[in-house]
Each structure stands twice: as C-alpha cells, then as structure tokens.
Image (spheres, rainbow, N blue to C red):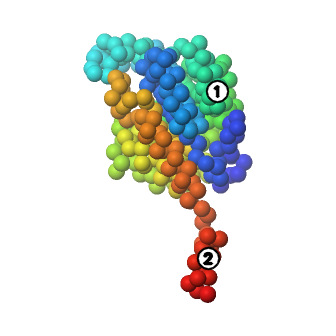
Amino acid sequence: FKDDNLINIDKFTISEKSECFIIAEIGNNHNGDMKIAKQLIDEAEKSGVNAVKFQTKDIETAFPQELLNKNYEGPNSFGKTYREHKQVLELNFEQLKELKQYSEKRNLIFFSTPFDIKSLENLSKLDMELYKISSFHVTDLKLVEAIAAREKPVIMSTGMSTLEEIDTAVEILDRYNCKYLIMHCVSSYPADPKDLNLRAINVLRNKYNCLVGYSGHETSANIAPSVVLYGACAIERHFTLDRAMKGPDHALSLSPPGMDILVKRSKILFDAKGKEEKFVTDSELKARKKFRG
C-alpha cells in the first residue's frame, strides 16, 4: 500500500489508519429547496459525518436531448418531462456557494459531483477541497481528465464498471499524479444485499494499491459499517430527512437515525479491527494469570 497516497483534507486525513471518512450524499434530496438543503446539512452535522456532497449538472449538456424530452410524469417527478424534472432539482452557482459556506461553518467538508465539464468549470470557482467522479462518468474520459487536471484529491465510484474501464480512468489519474480514492459501488437503486459483493473492496485495493471506500445504495444502515473490516477508509451514503419524501433517491437513502447508526458502528468497528497479528492483549493479562497461574 502506498503511504504517500494519504489524502489530507482540511483537518481530516483519509487513510487506513484513520477513522472512516463518512460522506452524506445529499445529491438531489434537497428537492430544489434551499431550506431543505440546509436542514440536511444540519442533520448531517448532528450525525457526525465528515462531509456533505451534492450534484451539479448543466442539464442540456449532461443528458441526451432524447432523454430530456421524454415524458416523466410519476409519483417522484417534479415536471412533465425529464428536462422539467431535472430543472426543478438543480441548484445554481450562488446557491451552491451559500451551501458551501453554510457547511463549513458547521465544520463539514462540502463538495459536489460535476456531471459535465461546464459544471466542473463552475464548481472550480468554489475552490472545493476534493472532486468526485461518479460511477456514471468512469468512461467519460474527457471529464475524468478535466477533473484530474484540477490537481485536487479525487474520489471515484466504480459502479457498473469493468476493471478494464477502471484501468483506463486510473491511468489518467496517475498521469496527473492525483491523490485518489476508489469506491466500490453497485449501481442498483436500491441495491439488493446479495448483489453488494463487498469483497471486491479487496480486489480494488490489491489491483490499484490505493485507498478504497464504499458507496452504497442499499436501504439498510447496518451493512455499510462492515466495510471498515475490509480496510475501507471512506463510506458514502445517500441522505434524506424522510425516506418517504417525493423524489427519486429518498427511498434508498438513510434518514438521520440511519446515518447515526452508520457513523457510530463505523467508529466501533474501526476500533475493533485491530492489527493483522495475534497477540495477548493487556486486558487479558488478569484472566491469564488467574486461569494459568
């Protein structure tokens, strides 16, 4: 493992020797409402996460016109077409700037995933401390390269990607000498526990010799903390005020009680993980003396 691949962000170091870096993925769960966005940040702070993440899209650039023009009326839709739906959910630059300041006052790291180069250029004006490459964009090599060129740490999810596709993206990150963390992810919404294949975390660490994490879409709060035992040093989970709210991602997100569970169990399992060696602990000495003399 490359010790020089540790990622230092503000007051937090992401490493296998540090407690797990927990990201509350707010994404679109603000429903286009700044009041909800700030409530989510407040609740994320209470849960003890390290960072909040949003998503930023230039609608006309990020999605095919055919998709944008499609009818999109349903219980989780905010418009008659996919375009109208996405437009309602999108936050502008000034709103993101306000949310970044709001987050930082609460000692939370703020960042947002760019879905296209135009959004990346806008986000770069916010001076974020790190960037995210979503699973959707592992094969968007122009965007991967544009993010790598920002010379900031990168977190890259790997849902629905082959190792060959990840190889190509990692080659670009290495070319720009990026600090990066690769997230194991299964892009099913929601993801069935039997499909999570958590042991792929070991595959990613061994193949790329880098920091690894986990981005989950399962409905349970109990599974994600276990990745700490596989050496994962970051966990990202979608976050909502109420899983029954209108919107496409709320049902697969964690509400505040679920995020509380994730954060607390991650800390407990980090302490319990220990070292890859067998030894007599100090706490065992009393029993050892009593029973063995």
Quadrant location of the C terminus in the rendered image: bottom right
Question: Residue 49: x and y, percent?
Answer: 56, 38
Residue that lies at the very extreme toward the right in this rendered image: 4
Question: In the structure shown, which secondary structural element does the residue marked by tag 2 occupy?
Answer: helix
Viewed as shown, does residue 262 lie left or right of 128?
Answer: left
Instruction: Tell me the number on the disc at residue 104.
Output: 1
Above or below: residue 289 compared with residue 223: below
- Residue 96 shows up from this direction: yes
Q: Nearer the viewer, mark 2 or mark 1?
A: 2
* Residue type (three-letter) at the residue carrying disc 2: Lys
- Residue 156 shows up from this direction: no
Quadrant location of the N terminus in the rendered image: bottom right
Question: Residue 256: x and y, percent?
Answer: 45, 35
Of residues 9 and 200, the one drawn nearer to the viewer in this rendering: 9
Above or below: residue 74 compared with residue 108: above
Residue at point 42%, 34% (across, down): 255
Residue at point 59%, 42% (across, down): 21
Of residues 141 and 243, the one drawn nearer to the viewer in this rendering: 243
Residue at point 38%, 29% (across, down): 242
Instruction: Tell me the number on the disc at residue 44.
Output: none
Instruction: Tell me the number on the disc at residue 286.
Output: 2
User: Looking at the rendering, which quadrant does residue 274 occupy?
Assistant: bottom right
Of residues 115 and 241, the one drawn nearer to the viewer in this rendering: 241
Viewed as shown, does residue 159 lie left or right of 208?
Answer: left
Of the residues under marks 2 and 1, which one precedes in the sequence?
1
* Residue type (three-letter) at the residue carrying disc 1: Glu
Question: Residue 277: x and y, percent?
Answer: 61, 69
Residue that lies at the very extreme toward the left in this rendered image: 74
